[in-house]
Image (spheres, grey):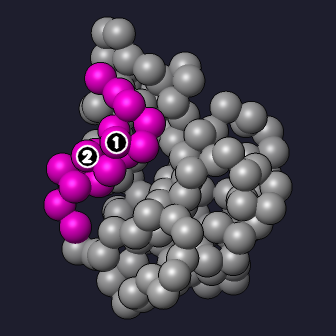
């Protein structure tokens, strides 16, 4: 993980969940370049143990459509177990309908993602 001087990475840990490795890596690298500490998971099932182990995750960015546990199911579980953790849904196929989390439609500009993260968490 990269860290910028004065970064808020110790208090602003983000978990990126996407079954597409390239998408997951690009999002993670972008957020790391902005000074956030980033963890990754390839599925909702993989994300839950990460959240249990690492109590410092403050935001989860998750794809909606994934094999097994969907991003919506993951978001519901996060709201139930970790209500203070913010959730951002990303998808090229889904449009939110009254969902309480933030949403970005794929393809999105990385600057839109980082702006959303900074507005939710603050940052460098």
- Judging depth in this view, the residue of 8 and 29 nearest the camera is 8
Give the residue displayed 18% in from the left and 50% down from the top: 111
Q: Does the magenta stretch include residue 48?
A: no
Total numbered labels: 2
- Judging depth in this view, the residue of 118 and 54 nearest the camera is 118
Q: In which quarter of the image is residue 80?
A: bottom right
- Kindly state the secondary structure of the residue where label 1 is placed: helix
Disc number for residue 115 = 2
Give the residue displayed 51% in from the left and 30% down from the top: 12
Looking at the magenta stretch, what is its main secondary structure?
Answer: helix
Evaluate whether residue 19 shows in this view: no
Q: In this view, does 14 lie above or below 76?
A: above
Lateral position of residue 52 relative to residue 43, left or right: right
Give the percent coordinates (x, y) of residue 46: 70, 60
Q: In this view, does 47 lie above or below 117?
A: below
Q: Does the magenta stretch include residue 117?
A: yes
**Which range of residues does the magenta coloring cover?**
108-124
Disc number for residue 20 = none
Evaluate whether residue 31 shows in this view: yes
Give the residue displayed 34% in from the left and 42% down from the top: 119
Q: Quadrant of the C terminus?
A: top left
- Kindly state the secondary structure of the residue where label 2 is placed: helix
Outermost residue, top direction? 5
Q: Do the residues labelled 2 and 1 touch (CB within 8 Å)?
A: yes
Give the percent coordinates (x, y) of residue 21: 43, 63
- Judging depth in this view, the residue of 30 and 82 nearest the camera is 82
Q: How crowded is mark 2: few (under 14 residues within 10 Å), some or many (20 or more)?
A: some
Residue at image mark 1: 119
């Amino acid at each position: 993980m990269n860290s910028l001087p004065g970064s808020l990475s110790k208090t602003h840990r983000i978990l990126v969940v996407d079954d597409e490795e390239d998408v997951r890596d690009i999002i993670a690298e972008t957020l790391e370049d902005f000074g956030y500490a980033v963890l990754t998971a390839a599925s909702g099932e993989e994300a839950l143990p990460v959240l249990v182990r690492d109590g410092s995750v403050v935001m989860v960015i998750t794809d909606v459509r994934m094999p097994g546990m969907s991003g919506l199911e993951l978001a519901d579980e996060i709201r139930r177990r970790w209500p203070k953790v913010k959730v951002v849904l990303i998808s090229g196929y889904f449009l939110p309908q009254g969902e309480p989390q933030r949403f970005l439609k794929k393809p999105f500009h990385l600057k839109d993602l980082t702006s959303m993260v900074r507005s939710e968490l603050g940052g460098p």
